[in-house]
Amino acid sequence: MEQGETTAPFAHKKIDTCTLGARLQTLREVEKLTQEDVARASRVRVEYVRALEEGRFDDLPAPVYVRGFLRMIARVLRTHEKQLITLYDREVGITQNVHKKNHTQQQATGPLAQKIYLYRSFLTPRHVVSVVAGVFVLGGVFYLYTVLHSFVSAPFVVVAAPQDGATVQSADIVVQGTTDPAAVLTINGENVVVGQDGHFETHVFVQEGVNEITLVATNRFDKTTQKTVSVRYTNPQPQPRAVTPEAVPETVTLTVRIVTARTWLNVRVDGEVVLTQTVDAGFEQTFEGKEIVITSGGGARTLVSRDGGEFMPLADVPGLVKDVRFAREVPTPAADTQQDKNVVE
């Protein structure tokens, strides 16, 4: 190759390849040379020519020797040696960085190294968006679960007082507890106000003996929960009832019984109100005093028995009956009913 021919071919050779190996192979094929031809002409071993085209830089000697190989090969292929050396240096640098990163990840141990690796792996914009989207999805699933759970499940009822099976010495007891704030609560059939926090409290009157207090909570989907608490009422000062045969009793004993339906009832004994509430059918209680006055919302379904006698209706009308008076000076309840009752239909 003469000196005057070295610069002319450079003007028209343009190889659009991105790697050193691809550029060497393309230039060689343009010159219609084999790898052995290039090795023979450049005096570079054929295995080094093959390693350069295949990008196997680990199979080559030190970079200073490889740059010399590229200068001699550039003359054979009639190209600029500086371009080949620049590509070689760039690709060798990339390869070294990759090896260094892999080596660092393999050698790094301990909690700190794992923490750094996790941060680099997860704290990317794509991962942040994925986490935020996941939070929204989980929130939606939780909301749907809450709505579905309220739809298919019954409301809860927790009775704080009185305790089931408790014995009390007052006819007026306090019933309190918690339930679903959106539920409708009844205690022995009477509606009870439920607070925004689900707390409720009301008074219930009981009679001597065992009483059952029934609580029913109903939600907007007509799901109900019922709880029953049993309470025994013991009068701490029972009135003596035994009298000698010769003595004439000064008081009248009156037993009141409600039948067929719930009825509002008011009882006054010797001028004092001892009972005023709506009672269920089956209610029965005994009162004793010198004067007993009964007011009932249903005269026909309110039966009375005086001094252990036969039960008779308080009145023959189904509506309100006011101030029916029973006293010792009145001979019989029938006569008392005729004389003292004031009926409002």
Image (spheres, rainbow, N blue to C red):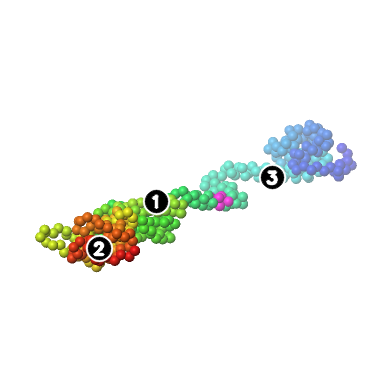
Q: In which quarter of the image is the C terminus?
A: bottom left
Distance from disc 2 to disc 1, alpha carbons, whole Å, reads: 44 Å
Report crowding for label 2: few under 14, some 14 to 19, many 20 or more residues within 10 A (C-alpha): some
Q: In which quarter of the image is the N terminus?
A: top right
Task: Name the quadrant containing residue 281.
Answer: bottom left
Distance from disc 3 to disc 2, alpha carbons, whole Å, reads: 118 Å
Q: In this view, does 12 lie above or below 34?
A: below
Q: In terms of depth relative to the viewer, which is nearer, 148 or 237?
A: 237
Q: Give the range drawn in magenta.
A: 133-138
The secondary structure type at the circle numbered 2 is helix
> Which residue is situated farthest in the left direction here?
246
Task: Name the quadrant containing residue 265.
Answer: bottom left
Q: Residue under circle 2?
A: 337
Q: In terms of depth relative to the viewer, which is nearer, 194 or 131?
A: 194
The secondary structure type at the circle numbered 1 is strand
The label on residue 225 is 1
Residue 235: x and y, percent?
A: 22, 58
| In magenta segment, residue 295 | no
For the residues carrying marks 1 and 3, which lies nearer the camera in this image?
A: 1
Earlier residue among tags 3 and 2: 3
Earlier residue among tags 2 and 1: 1
The label on residue 93 is 3
Residue 27: x and y, percent?
A: 81, 38
> Amino acid under label 2?
Thr
Q: Do the residues labelled 3 and 2 touch (CB within 8 Å)?
A: no
> Amino acid under label 3?
Gly
Report crowding for label 1: few under 14, some 14 to 19, many 20 or more residues within 10 A (C-alpha): some
